[in-house]
Image (cartoon, rainbow, N blue to C red):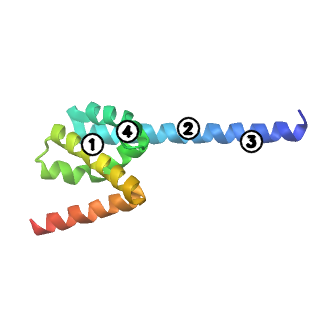
Amino acid sequence: MEPLQYGVTATALGALGTASTKSFAELEQNIGGVETLFKSSSQTVIDNANKAFSTAGISANEYMSNVTSFSASLLQGLNGDTAKAAQIADMAIIDMADNANKMGTSMESIQNAYQRIRKTAILLC
């Protein structure tokens, strides 16, 4: 191999290592958030996250990040019922993914729409 090729290979491997470390750190942070919010039902959310690629077409990290973004309101609306919140959160993520796939809309846009609906519902109650 030419010296230039070694440099390119080393740079690529370094970038891969950095991306892996960042992804692992995000996973740890997401798991911590799920454990904090869902307490005794956190393993259900983590298990659902691990199946998220087949059920919703998203990574476990993306699943947990999305769930934690709306779970505080969900838990409040369910009077702290973490088991029910885990179940509803999973249905919501799958619904969002289905809508994204059918409509060609990004998950982020759909999540924002769900957030607006949730805020409106809270104001109306």
Q: Which residue is mark 3?
A: 11
Q: Give the answer, above or below, for where 51 lies relative to 75.
A: above
Q: From the viewer's perspective, tell me whether residue 98 is left or right of residue 37.
A: right
As drawn, the label of residue 90 is 1
Q: Which sits earlier in the primary sequence, circle 4 or circle 1?
A: 4
Q: Which one is closest to the eye, mark 3 or mark 1?
A: 1
Q: Mark 4 and mark 3 in contact (Cβ < 8 Å)?
A: no
Residue under the image location 19 percent in, 43 percent down: 85
Q: From the viewer's perspective, tell me whether residue 102 is left or right of residue 36.
A: right
- Residue 2: quarter of image: top right
Mark 2 lies on a secondary structure that is helix
Label 3 neighbourhood size at 10 Å, few (<14), some (14-19), many (20+)?
few
Residue under the image location 56 percent in, 37 percent down: 21
Q: Mark 2 and mark 3 in contact (Cβ < 8 Å)?
A: no
Q: Nearer the viewer, residue 106 or 24?
A: 106
Mark 1 lies on a secondary structure that is helix
Q: Mark 1 and mark 3 in contact (Cβ < 8 Å)?
A: no
Q: Amino acid at mark 1?
A: Asp
Q: Nearer the viewer, residue 55 or 86?
A: 55
Q: Which residue is mark 2?
A: 21
Label 1 neighbourhood size at 10 Å, few (<14), some (14-19), many (20+)?
many
Label 4 neighbourhood size at 10 Å, few (<14), some (14-19), many (20+)?
many
Q: Amino acid at mark 2?
A: Thr
